Amino acid sequence: ASPPPSEQPGAATAEADTISKVLIVMGAIGFARLITAMEAEAMPLVHNFKLDEAPADESIFPKDAPWIRYHGKYKSLHIDLVRPGKDIIFGVDSVGTVSAALLTYASIQTLKPDLIINAGTAGGFNAKGASVGDVYLASDVAFHDRRIPIPVFDTYGVGARKAFATPNLLNELNFKAGKLSTGDSLDMAPQDEEAIVSNDATVKDMEGAAVAYVADMFSTPAIFVKAVTDIVDGEKPTAEEFLMNLRAVTTTLELAVVKVVDFISGKHISDL
Ligand code: ADE
């Protein structure tokens, strides 16, 4: 059973109003320089919602940050979609928790969203029923690579939190539900595996728990939409399977987020 809306993370004050500002924090899709700026313009999300890229000289972000923002009105919503952009030194997408947390922080400060949707790709566990192309809505998030074996620091490190529960959205859109575990590695070291099992995770990503940490800090409800690019406990090497499926699964992910946004439009936070 999901907790009543008033007991949910971030829901303390938002009950009365229809959702108006949605912040979509995208994972660093495009990982290995696969997605160019032109392709980004064709991204189903940017395209469907007719979002415009915010010009660099009017950026809400500090000028040295590589973060990218698209924005626009869609139905009753104001949508901001942010991406971490390219690493300034290495030129690849800024994958991982550090970029995700900074981007989420800066976005919340200026945009003050009613709801955050963290959307990205994930590895899935076959043993937990995941297949490539599945879209998960995370019920819980936690870290699997922050080992601090001192009482209380240990649970702080794991940082387990509930996602904002959206039982109606889950019912209506037929996504799978499962727990999400976050770490800064694409591969899985044995100690990470142990922690992922202990987190009871079905999907594994590189951003979710970091976005959740920041969202919680500023009492902003957050949900996590994760599309499976690779099977962690399968036969294929993770990086190879990830790269092979990235393009198709990114489209699946974005179409899923379009459905989520359509569902959210016109609703109160407590209707989700
Ligand atoms: N994103 C896509 N696949 C992943 C994996 N196996 N681990 C972490 N993040 C991912």
Image (spheres, rainbow, N blue to C red):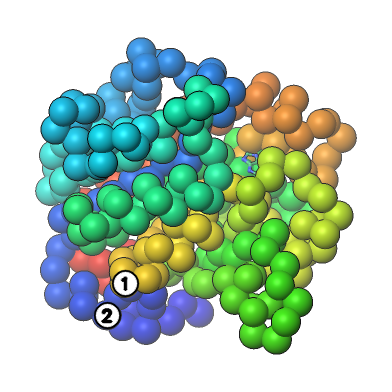
**Residue type at the position of mark 1:** Ser
N-term mark: 1 or 2: 2
Q: Is residue 35 visible?
A: yes
Q: Is ligand 1 within 8 Å of the beta carbon of the residue shown at mark 2? A: no
Q: Residue at x 37, y 17 (%)?
A: 37
Q: Can you give x and y, in whole percent of width and height, for residue 4 in the image?
A: 37, 82
- Crowding at mark 2 (Cα within 10 Å: few <14, some 14-19, many 20+): few
Q: Nearest the camera: 115 or 215?
A: 215
Q: Is ligand 1 within 8 Å of the beta carbon of the residue shown at mark 1? A: no
Disc 1 is placed on an element classified as loop
In the image, residue 75 sits, relative to residue 270, either above or below, namely: above
Q: Is residue 80 left or right of residue 156?
A: left
User: Which residue ends up furthest to the top in the rendered image?
Assistant: 38
Task: Determine contact: label 1, label 2, CB under 8 Å.
Answer: yes
Q: Quadrant of ligand 1?
A: top right
Disc 2 is placed on an element classified as loop
Q: Which numbered circle lies on residue 2?
A: none
Q: Which numbered circle lies on residue 219?
A: 1
Q: Is residue 259 visible?
A: no
The residue that disc 2 covers is 12
In the image, residue 207 sits, relative to residue 12, either above or below, namely: above
Q: Residue at x 46, y 45 (%)?
A: 99
Q: CA distance from mark 1 to mark 2?
A: 8 Å
Q: Nearest the camera: 129 or 57?
A: 57
Q: Can you give x and y, in whole percent of width and height, for residue 264 in the image?
A: 27, 54
**Residue type at the position of mark 2:** Ala
In the image, residue 60 sits, relative to residue 86, either above or below, namely: below
Q: Is residue 248 left or right of residue 57?
A: right
| Picture quadrant of residue 79 | top left
Q: Is residue 181 left or right of residue 12?
A: right
